[in-house]
Image (cartoon, rainbow, N blue to C red):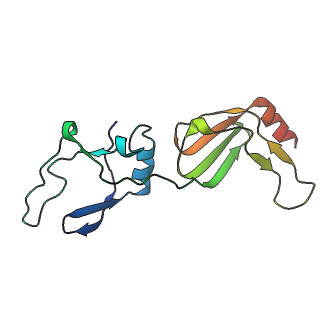
Amino acid sequence: EAFVLNSSLPTVINDTTLEFSFTVDDLNALKQQSQLAIGPLSSFISFTSAMITDMNSNAVVPVGASLARDVSAYLYDVTSPRLTFFTMDMNRGEMRLVFDETVERDTLTFGSFMLYSGVSNDTDIAVHTLRGGSSLSTDATNITIAFSESDLNEIKRK
């Protein structure tokens, strides 16, 4: 797999070192590539001579894909995703979960989250644990799920 940075720019330039901080869009697009940059053995770089020039306008020597350079240091992603917000469409029987980073759709576990009719210690709050459904999305920051018919009917009943 290969990935091209679309909007990330260098953040630190120190003599011979160039450091990039990924934009949120580039980072999320990169995370959607399931076999790319998941560790040091899947992290290589190639570039054209248009990447950068020196102080005398000499272009960098290009490195083609067949000679891609391996990463010299790699820090693993240890940041857990956070749910930013969610929406529900009871006419369509769908719920959209929006996270702050790309999540893996196939790891969505029905039964691991509940819907509540309110937030308090009140015993009159209706609670429903989702028992099934299907994901309508690919790996992304937005995951849309379709409620199972029994879950949808039970939610509407409560």
Residue 22 coordinates in the image, percent (x, y)? 38, 57
Q: Nearer the viewer, residue 125 or 32?
A: 32
Residue sitting at x 79%, y 42%: 129
Q: Which residue appears farthest toward the right when viewing the image? A: 123
Residue sitting at x 45%, y 42%: 32
Q: Nearer the viewer, residue 36 or 139?
A: 36
Q: Name the quadrant containing residue 104.
A: top right
Residue 16 coordinates in the image, percent (x, y)? 19, 64
In this picture, residue 114 sits left or right of residue 158? left
In this picture, residue 143 sits left or right of residue 151? left
How many numbered badges does the structure rendering display?
Answer: 0
In the rendered image, which quarter contains the C terminus?
top right
Residue 157 coordinates in the image, percent (x, y)? 87, 40
In the rendered image, which quarter contains the N terminus?
top left
In this picture, residue 97 sits left or right of residue 127? left
Residue 81 coordinates in the image, percent (x, y)? 57, 53
Q: Name the quadrant containing residue 146.
A: top right
Residue sitting at x 88%, y 53%: 125
Q: Which residue appears farthest toward the top when viewing the image? A: 149
Q: Nearer the viewer, residue 117 or 33?
A: 33
Q: 106 above or below 4?
A: above
Residue sitting at x 45%, y 49%: 28
